[in-house]
């Protein structure tokens, strides 16, 4: 069965017809759902750069991760609240 353009996505096809090869289907769905740009990665690094400054370079990884999590979610909440 071929994937018909406009009818179903490749991910849907693998979800429905990948039962014969479950490991390959899982891998295909993971690969095919990855974003095609680095925008999310760039946003993440921008938040890390704003949190990890010269004054805060002695913080541990767990504390930095917590600060990035809070900063990112705060930015999302202020943008969605407008």
Image: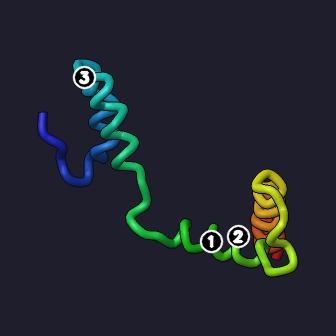
Query: Where is the N terminus found, in terms of image quarters?
Result: top left
Mark 1 near mark 2, Cβ–Cβ under 8 Å?
A: yes
Mark 3 near mark 1, Cβ–Cβ under 8 Å?
A: no
| Residue 18: image location, x then y, percent | 27, 26
Quarter of the image where one finds residue 23: top left
Q: Is residue 32 left or right of residue 65?
A: left
Residue at the far left in the pictured view: 1
Residue lying at 34% horizontally and 36% vertically, measured from the top left: 27
| Residue of label 3 | 21
| Residue 71: image location, x then y, percent | 81, 67
**In terms of depth relative to the viewer, which is nearer, 59 or 81?**
59
| Precedes in sequence: disc 3 or disc 2 | 3
Residue lying at 31% horizontally and 22% vertically, measured from the top left: 22
Task: Using a 10 Å C-alpha cutoff, classify the residue at mark 2 as few (fewer than 14 neighbours), some (14 to 19) or many (20 or more).
Answer: some
Query: What secondary structure is marked by label 3?
Result: loop
| Residue 46: image location, x then y, percent | 66, 76
Q: Nearer the viewer, mark 3 or mark 1?
A: 1
Quarter of the image where one finds residue 26: top left
How much space separates mark 3 and mark 2, taking CA atoms? 39 Å
**In terms of depth relative to the viewer, which is nearer, 8 or 72?**
72
| Residue 43: image location, x then y, percent | 61, 72
How much space separates mark 1 and mark 2, taking CA atoms? 5 Å
Q: Is residue 78 left or right of residue 14?
A: right
Image height of 16 relative to 62, above or below: above
Image height of 72 relative to 22, above or below: below
Query: What secondary structure is marked by label 1?
Result: helix
**In terms of depth relative to the viewer, which is nearer, 80 or 48?**
48
| Residue of label 2 | 48
| Residue of label 1 | 45
Query: What secondary structure is marked by label 2?
Result: helix
Quarter of the image where one finds residue 12: top left
Residue lying at 28% horizontally and 45% vertically, measured from the top left: 10
């Amino acid at each position: 069965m071929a994937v018909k353009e406009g009818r179903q996505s490749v991910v849907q096809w693998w979800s429905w017809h990948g039962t014969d090869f479950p490991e390959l289907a899982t891998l295909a769905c993971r690969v095919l759902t990855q974003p095609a740009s680095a925008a999310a990665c760039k946003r993440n690094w921008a938040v890390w750069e704003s949190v990890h400054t010269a004054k805060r370079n002695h913080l541990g990884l767990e504390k930095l991760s917590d600060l990035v999590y809070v900063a990112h979610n705060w930015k999302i909440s202020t943008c969605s609240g407008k």
